[in-house]
């Protein structure tokens, strides 16, 4: 017999992440017993979404708790009403209740079998055409919302559910009504579509023109002549805002993805994927790990080692101080490990392949920084220089050169300059390239000379090879 764990409203408020919740679980709200079987999402201190059983039916529960729980519960119900009034498909609302004594509000929805969010569908898509098809599906529903004067305040593809036959709109608390309109105002449409298009990769922006044309046809109304231009300008602002928010609100703070150790002598931020015991050992004695690791690269500025923890390998890089003067100058500056950590997560955020950053550590004395370290996943493979020394066929070399060309162009299109784009800083994993050694990476505001400089550095290593035409296709070199 499966053991049922009982949870209370107090438990809900103290859960920080999914690892603290044991399922199946039973929660009593007033006189109703809610049986939760699997966790789908936990927003610490605010909301839990899970599958469960209600009146012998498989359902989806949304549980609201913590400060302002009633306001958020009401907002979800109001959003569901708006969706239904717009005649848009949404999971059926089965029951809802708000209990002041326990401080919990819950809503019960029908469970849609074999459904995936459009975000999941996008991640599983094999081709760009498949990805664009999912965007078009969402756009059709967005146009329908706008015609009914409603919009998602934070448009993202997790709010669309596809079961293979129909598309559902979910998450009513993200819905807002623009009163007094006959269809959403042009200003709101521009903002909302720009927010939606932030989910396109930068190199997919060429499809925006077609999407906007499709949207105008769906709405069957005239828009200003500068409609497309206004959307793309707003999109650039939103992209910059999203990146900044991601770095400032998440990457250097304790959140669902990362945890922090901070005191007078260390500052470390690390992925919650890592074992906490291992993290504490590494933070307390990083140089022990460096000394015991397999040295892959050693120089005045840094040492790179491969370390082993159980059956998992990692790459640990220590940034050295060249001299006392260098140490004094660097002690009040952002550490190179912190720069690499930020840049790695910016690439991940922009879907540009790199080794996943897992931990960043700074030795400190109060506000003064000492040595710094970064831990990334270990990826079996070799750098591009070594790859092209192998006895592979010309066809394989040509194909890899084309993939590297695309990788670097995607980074540049996303607004990044590597800063040291030599062949040793392009890692080949199987048949796919990725960027490594990111402490010199910078944002680029469209300066062509910086892009040319990146390519010129790579050309010095690989420009005279037989595959160089594929590697530097479409590249301007000076």
Image (cartoon, helix red, strand yellow):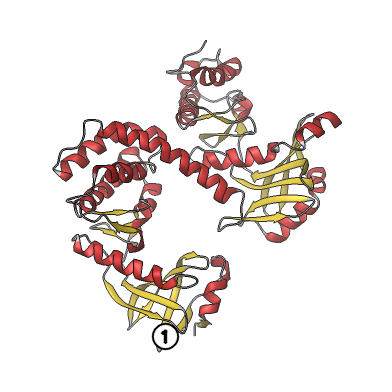
For the point 23% across and 57% down, which residue is it?
165
Residue 399 position (above or below residue 195): above
- Residue 332 placement (x, y as % from top left): 75, 37
How many neighbours does mark 1 have within 10 angstroms: few (below 14), some (14-19), or many (20 or more)?
Answer: few
* Residue 74 or residue 420, whichever sits in front: 74
Q: Is residue 463 visible?
A: yes
On the rendered structure, is 225 left or right of 207? left
Q: Which residue is mark 1?
A: 33
* Residue 157 or residue 180, whichever sits in front: 180
Q: Secondary structure at mark 1?
A: strand
On the rendered structure, is 137 left or right of 269? left
For the point 64% across and 44% down, which residue is it?
376
- Residue 397 placement (x, y as % from top left): 50, 24
Quadrant housing residue 72:
bottom left
- Residue that sits furthest to the bottom in the current view: 31
For the point 19% across and 37% down, which residue is it?
223
């Amino acid at each position: 017999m499966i053991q049922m764990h009982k949870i209370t409203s107090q438990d809900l408020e103290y859960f920080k992440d999914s690892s603290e919740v044991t399922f199946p679980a039973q929660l009593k709200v007033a006189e109703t017993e809610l049986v939760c079987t699997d966790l789908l999402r936990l927003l610490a201190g605010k909301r839990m979404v899970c599958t469960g059983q209600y009146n012998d039916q498989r359902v989806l529960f949304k549980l609201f708790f913590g400060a302002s729980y009633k306001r958020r519960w009401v907002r979800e119900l109001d959003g569901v009403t708006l969706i239904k009034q717009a005649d848009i498909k949404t999971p059926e609302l089965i029951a809802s209740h708000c209990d002041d004594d326990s401080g919990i509000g819950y809503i019960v929805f029908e469970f849609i079998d074999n459904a995936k969010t459009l975000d999941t569908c996008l991640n599983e898509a094999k081709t760009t055409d498949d990805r664009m098809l999912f965007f078009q599906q969402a756009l059709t529903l967005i146009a329908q919302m706008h015609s009914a004067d409603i919009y998602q305040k934070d448009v993202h593809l997790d709010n669309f559910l596809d079961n293979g036959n129909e598309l559902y709109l979910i998450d009513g608390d993200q819905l807002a009504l623009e009163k007094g309109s006959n269809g959403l105002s042009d200003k709101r449409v521009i903002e909302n579509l720009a927010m939606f298009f932030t989910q396109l990769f930068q190199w997919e922006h060429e499809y925006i023109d077609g999407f906007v044309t499709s949207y105008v046809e769906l709405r069957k109304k005239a828009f200003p002549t500068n409609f497309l231009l206004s959307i793309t300008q707003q999109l650039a602002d939103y992209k910059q805002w999203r990146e900044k928010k991601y770095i400032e609100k998440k990457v250097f703070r304790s959140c669902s993805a990362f945890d922090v150790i901070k005191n007078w002598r260390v500052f470390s931020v690390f992925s919650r994927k890592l074992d906490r015991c291992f993290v504490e050992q590494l933070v307390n004695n990083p140089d022990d790990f460096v000394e015991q690791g397999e040295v892959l690269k050693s120089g005045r500025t840094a040492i790179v080692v491969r370390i082993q923890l159980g059956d998992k390998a990692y790459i640990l890089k220590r940034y050295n101080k060249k001299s006392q003067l260098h140490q004094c100058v660097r002690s009040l500056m952002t550490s190179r490990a912190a720069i690499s950590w930020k840049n790695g997560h910016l690439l991940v955020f922009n879907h540009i392949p790199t080794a996943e950053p897992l931990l960043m550590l700074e030795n400190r004395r109060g506000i003064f920084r000492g040595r710094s370290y970064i831990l990334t996943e270990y990826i079996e493979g070799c750098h591009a220089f070594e790859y092209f020394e192998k006895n592979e066929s010309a066809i394989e070399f040509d194909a890899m050169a084309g993939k590297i060309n695309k990788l670097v162009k995607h980074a540049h299109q996303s607004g990044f300059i590597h800063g040291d784009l030599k062949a040793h800083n392009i890692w080949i994993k199987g048949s796919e390239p990725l960027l490594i050694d990111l402490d010199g990476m910078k944002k680029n505001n469209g300066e062509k000379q910086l892009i040319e400089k990146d390519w010129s550095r790579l050309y010095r290593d690989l420009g005279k090879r037989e595959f160089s035409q594929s590697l530097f296709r479409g590249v301007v070199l000076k």
